[in-house]
Structure formats: structure tokens, C-alpha cells
Image (cartoon, grey):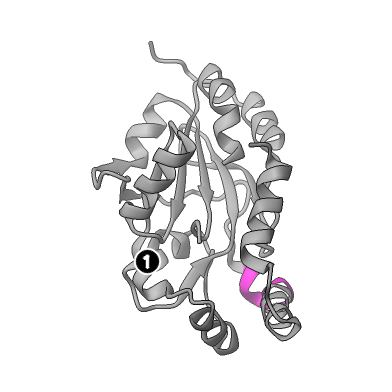
Amino acid sequence: MALQAIQPDLAALGASLVAISPQLPEHNRELIRTRHLTFEILTDRGNEVANRFGLRFALPDDLHKLYLTFPLDLEKFNGDASWTLPIPARFVIDQQGVIRHAESDPDYTTRPEPEDTLAALRTLSPVRKT
Amino acid sequence: MSLKAELKTLRTRLESNRSPEALAIMHRAVEDLRKSWATDRILRVGDRAPDFQLPNANEKPVDSRVLRERGPLVVTFYRGRW
């Protein structure tokens, strides 16, 4: 993940980073090992947290059937039969729990620019605890 | 890996050797989502972020409130690495 590259900048700004997806922890362990990730990647079964951020959607039937032919069995991969996914998104949340920056795009082949995330963080003045 | 290189890899993995019919279904699903009401529900700047407690890769719980006490929190949602 390109996010790994901005980890030192995030640390310098006193910020934490977590990535959330519905995939099972065993797949996240694989990802951490092969990509040498140092931030937390969390499992959101059934996309329940994604739903609270307004991101959960159900796959249309034709896409569901198509994925099974790939074969891509989301039910097995995510340990959940809902065939839902999150709309890819990134949020910067301040220490009071208020969203200060939000980006999302249903196109799974795009990603928010890490630099935009850093710019949003620089506008906050974190209370550094040492 | 740079963001650009990563996205190229992602696109290749998901979309190479797919029939035109398959690609049409995949791309239509993205466009339908973009045009639908679905994106109106997404939380915006100024909204209160829901707190959460979710298992990490080692199945240990991670609590957003604990992370927020230390500083600002960046949360990225992604579909998975398939």
C-alpha cells in the first residue's frame, strides 16, 4: 500500500493510521507480511462499521455472479455471506472525534492521494502526548 | 510501491484477461454506484465519526477511542486485496 510510504510523516504529525476492510484477519496477516506494513489493518465483518460511515453497499446480482466465475468467493474471503463491500474512502478524524477531511470514490482502481491526507492533518494542531 | 504503480497492479490483477462482457458488468457497477443515492449517505466533514472496536491482523481488538487520545486518526476503507 502506498500509505506505508507516508507512515513517517503521519508519525511526525502525531497521527495514527488504520485500514479497514471486510476481509478476514488471515488475509490481513498475509498482506502485512508480504508488504511489510507497520500500520494496523482491521477486519470489519459484514461491513458494519463501514455502514455507520455510510459506505456499505450490496453488490448487484450480475457482479455477484461474475465474481463467482473468476473465481472470487467473497463469502469465503470475508467470512460473511452478505456480499456487501465498502465504497473506498478515507477520513481524517480529529481528537474530538469530528471528521475534518473526507474522500471517497466508488471506482476501486483510484485511491485518495496520500499528500491530500497529510495536508488535512497539517491543518490540525494535535496535542502531542509524550 | 508508488500509488501509481500500485493502482496499475490492481487494475491488471482484477481486469486482465476478462471478457468485454465481464468488464462491462464491473464498470457499470461502479458507474451505477456513482450515480445512485448510495453516496449521499457517506459522512462528511464536520460530522461526528462513529467510534469502533475491530480486530487487527492478529485478532487483537483495536479501539478508535484509544487511538484518538494519542492524536488525529486517519481511517482508510478498502475492499480487500483480491
Residue A15, compared with residue B64, is above or below; it is: above
Q: Please state the total of marks drawn on the protein image.
A: 1
**Chain containing mark 1:** A
Q: Is residue A88 visible?
A: yes
Where is mark 1, residue-wise? A78
Question: Residue A29: image x %, image y %?
Answer: 35, 46
Quarter containing the N terminus of chain A: top right
**Label 1, residues with CA under 10 Å away: few <14, some 14-19, many ≥20:** many
Dominant SS in magenta: helix
**Which residue is the extreme one toward the top?**
A130
Indicate yes or no whether the magenta region holds residue B38: yes
Above or below, A102 against B31 in this view is: above
Q: Residue furthest front?
A: B17
Q: Magenta stretch?
A: B33-40
Does residue A125 belong to the magenta stretch?
no
Q: Is mark 1 on a helix, strand or loop?
A: helix
Taking the spot 54% from the left edge, 33% from the top edge, the residue there is: A4
Residue A84 position within the rendered picture, expressed as x and y whole percent measured from the top left: 47, 74
Compared to A130, does A49 lie above or below? below
Look at label 1 and name its amino acid.
Asn
Q: Residue at the spot x=54%, y=77% of the render?
A: A70
Coordinates of residue B28 in the picture (x, y in percent): 72, 80
Q: Which residue is drawn at 37% across and 58% down?
A: A44
Along the viewing direction, whichever of B48 and A130 lies nearer the viewer = A130
